[in-house]
Image (cartoon, helix red, strand yellow):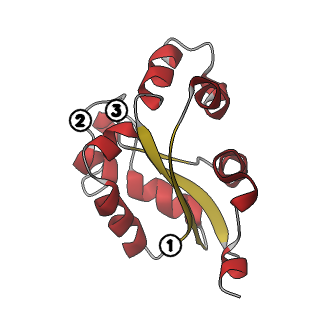
Amino acid sequence: MTTERTLLMVKPDGVRRNLVGLIIARIEQKGVVISNMRMFCMDDAFARTFYAEHDGRDFFPALLSYMTSGPVVALQVESPNAVAIVRTSIGATRPEDRLPGTIRADFSTQLTENVVHASASPTDAERELALVFGDSCTTLGSIHT
């Protein structure tokens, strides 16, 4: 089976609330491997590029403010079906749709500050990983050789 990679990001509220270790443990328990990790602060320009698909929506200014409010921890994770595994593990964005046992159901306190971001598709994952990790974006095979 082909290895897929995706992005999982602990958002500023998750970092502030010291949930990074718990989130990493949960995702590793699902069998994915962390192949790159970075803590950084998004500036406005980066956040606008990262969330460009939401530009023009009512919530976009609040999203930019939130995502630039503190550091994030970005994880490149790999496994077969990594996108689906991570998306299922984090749970739905809307509180009423969150299943018990998902990261967002267990740790999110509201709709907008929902602890984590995960790439929605393999195409989104490649774009987001390139934005976050640039040239240091590596595949699992290359770091174990």
Q: Quadrant of the C terminus?
A: bottom right
Badges 1 and 3: C-beta atoms under 8 Å apart? no
Q: CA distance from mark 1 to mark 3?
A: 25 Å
Q: Which amino acid type is marked by label 1?
A: Val
Q: CA distance from mark 2 to mark 1?
A: 26 Å
As drawn, is 58 to the left or to the right of 89? Answer: right
Q: Which residue is mark 1?
A: 32
Nearer to the camera, 33 or 145: 145
Badges 3 and 2: C-beta atoms under 8 Å apart? yes
SS for dot 3: loop
Q: Decide if residue 143 is in sight here.
A: yes
Q: Which residue is mark 3?
A: 113
Q: Is residue 111 above or below residue 82?
A: above
SS for dot 2: loop
Q: Which amino acid type is marked by label 3?
A: Glu
Q: Residue at x 26, y 51 (%)?
A: 18
Q: Decide if residue 1 is in sight here.
A: no
Q: Which residue is mark 2?
A: 109
